[in-house]
Amino acid sequence: MPRLLAVCAVRRLHSDAGAVGVTAIDKAPAAGRVRVGPYGVYADVQADRKHHGGLDQAVYAYAQEDADFWAGELGRDIPAGMFGENLRVAGLDVSNARVGEIWRIGESVELQVTLPRTPCQTFARWIGGEDERGWVKRFSRERRLGAYLRVVRKGRIEAGDEIAVIPAPADAPTILDIYRGPE
């Protein structure tokens, strides 16, 4: 059974060389039960609201299995929240989730898969700047993107909750089917 390993919210804002001048990518696991509302995890923020957040990108999920891959590639730990995700999950192939499928987490929260993550230069700077040149293309090429979700039913979740997947129609595209990353 797929499981929620961590619920993450912004730890602190950081200065960033991008157009907004600040980033909220630094996320860390929250303790205990965490509220999830229409715009995502309680106490989380998005600094660049033009490209992140909103109802269709309320929550970003990333798979532990993909984080483990990157830990091996980068030679360092990738703790929950490091990729800016709100949910670290295990037992789900997040990047091959079908658009429209519902994730029922814990007793009440329901999230619907909507969009792939599109890696950006803020993400590249956060991961390693000059040490990880070409990060956006590299991340895209590996196709371990994670998924954005909209909140269908609000409630509270916490690490350890089981995730039940209510399938989308079999002909619904996967996150990778609709991803159009850098060439």
Image (cartoon, grey):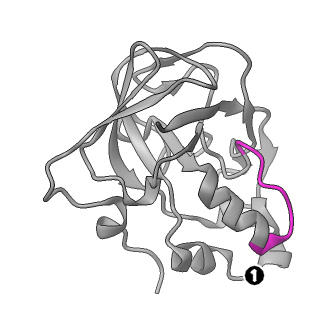
Residue 56, by quadrant, is top left
Q: Residue at x 45, y 55 (%)?
A: 93
Indicate left or right for 158 with 58 as reference: right
Q: Is residue 120 above or below residue 111?
A: below
Indicate left or right for 101 with 15 as reference: left
Residue found at the far bottom of this picture: 183
**Which secondary structure class fits the magenta region best?**
loop
Residue 153 location, x and y as percent?
Answer: 33, 18
Q: Residue at x 61, y 56 (%)?
A: 65
Q: Is residue 112 above or below residue 183?
A: above
Residue 160 location, x and y as percent?
Answer: 61, 25
Q: Is residue 110 above or below residue 20?
A: above
Residue 149, by quadrant, is top left
Q: Secondary structure at mark 1?
A: loop
> Which amino acid type corresponds to the residue marked 1 in the rendered image?
Arg
Please tell me whether residue 86 belongs to the stretch shown in magenta: no
Q: Residue at x 65, y 50 (%)?
A: 20
Indicate left or right for 33 with 180 as reference: right
Magenta range is 73-81
Q: Residue at x 65, y 67 (%)?
A: 121
Residue 18 location, x and y as percent?
Answer: 68, 60
Q: Return the residue nearer the eye: 1 or 8.
A: 1
Please tell me whether residue 76 belongs to the stretch shown in magenta: yes
Which residue is denoted by mark 1 in the rendering? 133
Indicate left or right for 38 with 171 as reference: right
Residue 169 location, x and y as percent?
Answer: 14, 49
